[in-house]
């Protein structure tokens, strides 16, 4: 969640950064690293570091209090694996498609496909096989609705690679949709209805992070569009407006959800001592405002990097999680 493009690829925040130790010789950076350079190159092209984003498939079941229901962990595990296959397929196809441009890039030329470690036909073929496995597996192991969600993800991301990444506003929406579709997939996998407030919160929350990242990139390049040409189409003021608007809608929709009726699930205990869900609004607001600090400073790069380096943000997020777990347990 590939969710975005940096000149020729669907996302610098979704890609493992290349380093000078990756090498420059024509046989590729991994050719000197062991007896299995091609499998290792395929794995690296699949961006294992980014698979953590697929944990979002747990969001809807967690919000509904269904994580511990019989059979749910197995289905969610399958859903996570299937979305990982789908996202890896996009990375492979994208790197194969953009191989010529990547070879001219100062850092992307170290990627396995661009460096020649992974042949272009093999990258295309592996990507298509993974995409087919993701769709077939979703239909067989989860549900037709999950297959539809994963299929929508694949179509949108392939269109992004070829067209949408050049269209202002559309690129923001498509990148955000990658996160939203992940969150939807978990609900469809176990057959629970998706709350409209959950969808609005997840969708605008994703837009908030995407716009904040674009704002940081725009400020860092001064509008040159050197690494992402589309940035020149946005002004800093416009991107600031987008992430502020998205943050406001995210907070409002979460409040309406938290103050509404509790999840209708046989696995959610009624009669809580304290109103934990409404109380969770406070740490959720702190998380949003704390992330906005980095957005305002134009320091909100990859979302996972922001979270991992900021202890107050981690504490606020953990507090929110504890309060919500209390509401599910009915404590």
Image (tube, rainbow, N blue to C red):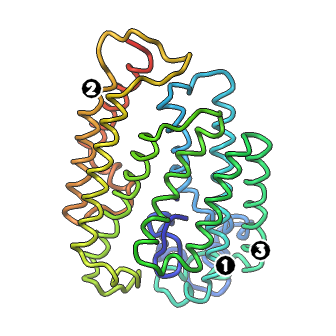
Residue located at (33% from left, 47% from top): 250
Q: Are marks 1 and 2 in contact (CB under 8 Å)?
A: no
Crowd class of label 3 (few under 14; some 14 to 19; many from 20; radius 10 Å): some
Residue at 57% x, 62% y is 47
Q: Which mark is residue 96?
A: 1
The numbered dot on residue 279 is 2
Residue 195 vertical position relative to residue 167 in the rendered view, above or below: above
**Is label 2 in a helix, a strand or a loop?**
helix
Q: Quadrant of residue 143?
A: top right
> Looking at the rendered structure, which numbered label has been put on residue 122?
3
Q: How far separated are the C-alphas under marks 1 and 3?
A: 9 Å
Q: Earlier in the sequence, mark 1 or mark 3?
A: 1
Q: CA distance from mark 1 to mark 2?
A: 48 Å
Q: Quadrant of residue 283?
A: top left
- Above or below, 21 against 290 in this view is below
Whichever of labels 3 and 2 marks the residue nearer the N terminus, that label is 3
Q: Is residue 266 left or right of residue 39?
A: left
Relative placement, left or right, of 169 versus 15 is left
Q: Residue 202's x, y, as percent?
A: 43, 47
């Amino acid at each position: 969640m590939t969710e975005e493009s940096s000149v020729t690829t669907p996302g610098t925040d979704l890609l493992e950064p290349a380093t000078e130790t990756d090498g420059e010789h024509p046989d590729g950076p991994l050719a000197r690293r062991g007896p299995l350079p091609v499998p290792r190159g395929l794995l690296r092209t699949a961006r294992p570091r980014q698979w953590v984003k697929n944990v979002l498939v747990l969001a809807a079941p967690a919000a509904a209090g269904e994580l511990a229901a019989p059979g749910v962990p197995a289905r969610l595990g399958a859903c996570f694996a299937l979305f990982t296959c789908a996202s890896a397929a996009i990375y492979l196809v994208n790197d194969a498609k953009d191989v010529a441009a990547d070879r001219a890039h100062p850092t992307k030329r170290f990627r396995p496909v661009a460096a020649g470690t992974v042949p272009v036909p093999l990258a295309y073929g592996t990507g298509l096989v993974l995409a087919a496995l993701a769709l077939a597996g979703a239909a067989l192991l989860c549900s037709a609705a999950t297959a539809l969600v994963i299929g929508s993800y694949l179509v949108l991301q392939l269109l992004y690679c070829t067209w949408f990444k050049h269209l202002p506003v559309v690129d923001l929406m498509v990148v955000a949709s990658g996160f939203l579709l992940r969150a939807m997939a978990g609900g469809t996998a176990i057959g629970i209805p998706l709350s409209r407030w959950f969808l609005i919160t997840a969708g605008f929350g994703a837009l908030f992070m995407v716009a904040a990242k674009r704002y940081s990139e725009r400020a860092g390049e001064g509008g040159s569009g050197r690494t992402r040409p589309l940035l020149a189409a946005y002004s800093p003021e416009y991107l600031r407006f987008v992430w502020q608007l998205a943050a406001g809608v995210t907070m409002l929709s979460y409040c309406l959800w938290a103050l509404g009726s509790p999840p209708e699930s046989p696995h959610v205990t009624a009669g809580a001592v304290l109103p934990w869900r409404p109380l969770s609004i406070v740490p959720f607001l702190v998380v949003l405002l704390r992330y906005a600090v980095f957005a305002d400073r134009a320091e909100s790069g990859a979302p996972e990097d922001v979270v991992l380096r900021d202890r107050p943000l981690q504490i606020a997020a953990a507090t929110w999680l504890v309060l919500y777990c209390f509401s599910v347990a009915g404590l």
